[in-house]
Every structure is written in C-alpha cells, then in structure tokens.
Amino acid sequence: MAKKRSRGTHSGSIYQSGGAWFCSVMVAGRRRRTRHKTKAEANAALRPLIEQAKAEAHLRPGSFGELREQWVRHVRANKATKTAESYYTAVQKFSELDELPVFQITPGQLQRILDSLSGRSRQQAFDILRKLMRDAVSWGWLSQSPMDPLQRPSHQRAPILPFTLEEVRRILEEVEETRYGPAIHLALACGLRGGELWGLNWGDWTGETLRVRRQACETAEGIEIKETKTSSGNRLIPLPPSVVKALEIRWDQRERDGEEGEIMFPNISGGRTRRTGFANRTWKTLLKELGIPHRGFHHARHTAATLLLNSGVPLSVDGRKSGGKGKGRSTDHHETDNDSPECLHTRSRKPLTLFAAHVQSVVIVQQAALRFA
C-alpha cells in the first residue's frame, strides 16, 4: 500500500476543480488557497502566495483584541487625551473580530462592519482602522494591511451657515450683560474657538489686546488644558472698543460677585467651562429663545471669518487673526446667505457698509486689516 505523502509547510500546488483553477499553499498544517479562471493565472499567483505564507510564518501571533489593546495603549501614550478617546471609540466598533487571529482578518470582514456605519462615523472609523493596521504591519503583526484594497468612504460635509448680521445683532443684544456675553462677543467678533475661550485667563487680557495661548479640552476625566490647536493659534489679537467694553463689564461682574481665580469665563462653580455644558444649557437655549435656527457654537467662528472676508480683509490676514492656516481653507466654507439683503457673498470682496452700522461689536475688521498688513 502506497504511503501517504504529507505536504511540508509553505509547499504549494495548483489543481482544477469544478471548472476553476486553484493554487494552494500549506501554512502551519492548514491549507490556504485562491481561486482563478485559468491554469496560467493560478501558476502566476502561486509564487506570491508562497512568499506571503513564508512571511506570515514569522509574524507575531495574537488576536485582533490583543492588537487593539496594544494599539490603544500606544495612542494614549502619544496622543492628546481627547484624540485617544476618539480613536478608542472608533476601533471599539470592530470588537466582534477580537477573537480572530490578526492575520486571518480579511478585507471583506472589515468592509462589512464599515458598511454598517454611516456618514462621518464610517469615514472616521475607516481612517482610524487604517492607522491601526499600518502600525500592525510596522510591529510585525501583519505582512500586509487588509485595509489596502478598501476604498475610503465618501462623506458630504455639512454646509456651514454663518449667522446673518441681524442674527448677530440680536444675539449680542440678548447676552450683553450675561456671564458668557463677552465670550460670545469674542467668538463673533474675533473668531475664537470654544476651547480657546474656555482656556482664557485674566492675565491674557491687556487693555486693547488679548493673547491666545492655550485651549481647554473636554475629556471623559474632565477638562484638560493644553496648547492651541495649531502653532499659529498662539497669537495676539487686537480688540475693538466694543469687545474691550464687554470684558470690562465682565470684570466688574467678577468683582461684584466676589469671584476668585484667574479663569476669565468660569462656570457657576468657578471651574473651567465645559464645552458640552455651555452648548446645551446656554447656546442652544439662547438661539431657541431668539427664534434663530440652531447652529453649533463653532459657527460663530465662521461668522467672524465671513464678515472679515466680506469687508475685504485678505485670506492670509483672516487666517492669522483667527488662528487658522490662512489660505488652506476654501472661502466656500465662509459664505453668507446670498438671498439676504444684509449679507454679501464672500467672493464679492466689496466693503460691507452695513457691518459697522448694524454690528458695532465687530469694528475690529478695519483694525485687523491695518495691524496685520
């Protein structure tokens, strides 16, 4: 009786079955095969499959769950707390693969999970998982990323809708002497980000200028104070008289109420204001009471940029003043309502005469143009 010959590891063969041709390779006692239409195609695919099997034989063994835990630890050690939290949330969506060996994960399995998500969430999950798999290749868990064959999901960005001049006027009138009035004033007039506002201290204000040097980031553990979002975010901002007056009123309120500490815009407990708390309790309520369609607080920053552009301030000046990257963003993101008689399209570059007449609080346009020229 003929003795059965066992195949060695990484040995390969091709064969025909059911009208199709297969190339097959043994890896650690298990067969891996690919299907092809012709014998020539199977022959051409055999050598790369053998080389891949040899490379994977030296890969680090472990499950996707183990890889995910290691990668999250790596991210937490090298990224900001808020960024690490968002990365953890994204890769958590793939936890159903935790028990699988990493090298057995296929593009199809990843695509199926991505397809169960929608919108921006799917795109973010794709980007973060691609980072994870690339690190897995670098660390020796994989020879090739299973994300490589997949296409990045498309996502249509939500339109940015700056506030009209009439809406700005009504908002500023309503919040004139409130705790957060000067903060809202600064956002609409100077384009400060929310985190930059909540990170301000009284020592950052010197008469007619304001130094932005930090931001307050909300995390699961609380508020984290760190550097500004970009290097250009650390900037000195000239203040218009109306903003200076608003800050003086806020200082008088602080003295009258006996507040202590260096925080410019604290919450009622004296600590740093939380972004979500302000958005839900103050901003959303304010717009609802005024009958203004809801927009996130970051739209105040876009409103400031739109007003500056409409007044003829160059993009580079606008970017330096707001702490952005100058011409990196398209002006299409900073457009006013073309149907409103009080608003001009950003690309018109015409002087916005109604700007000074209706919203005295943003006279800073002319000051900024002169000081940054």
Image (cartoon, helix red, strand yellow):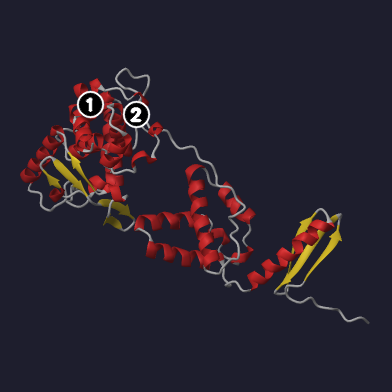
Judged from this view, the residue extending furthest toward the front is: 373
On the rendered structure, is 105 left or right of 339?
A: right
Question: Relative to residue 225, is residue 148 drawn left or right?
Answer: right
Q: Quadrant of the C terminus?
A: top left
The residue positioned 16% from the left and 32% from the top of the image is 176
User: Is residue 297 visible from the viewing direction of this image?
Assistant: no
Which x, y percent locates residue 257? 8, 45
Instruction: Find disc 2 in the rendering and name its residue.
Output: 293
Residue 172, horizontal then vertical, whole percent = 20, 30
Q: Nearer the viewer, residue 284 or 192?
A: 192
Which residue type carries mark 2?
Answer: Pro
- Quarter that holds the N terminus: bottom right
Instruction: Please tell me whether mark 2 or mark 1 is closer to you in this view.
Output: 1
Which residue appears at 65% of the width and 73% of the height?
Answer: 57
Assign a secondary structure to mark 1: helix
Residue type pointed to by label 1: Arg
Instruction: Pinpoint residue 216: horizontal percent, then vertical percent.
Output: 26, 51
- Residue 169 is labelled as 1
Task: Note whether 234 is above or below 336 in the view shown.
Answer: below
How crowded pointer 2 is (Cα within 10 Å; few <14, some 14-19, many 20+) is rated as few
Question: Which disc number belongs to residue 17?
Answer: none
Within 10 Å of the Cα at label 1, are there few (<14), some (14-19), or many (20+) other Cα atoms?
A: some
Of callouts 2 and 1, the N-terminal one: 1
Res. 96 in view? yes
Q: Nearer the viewer, residue 43 or 168?
A: 43
Residue at image location 32% in from the left, 43% down from the top? 324
Give the quadrant of residue 348.
top left
Q: Is residue 232 above or below residue 296?
A: below
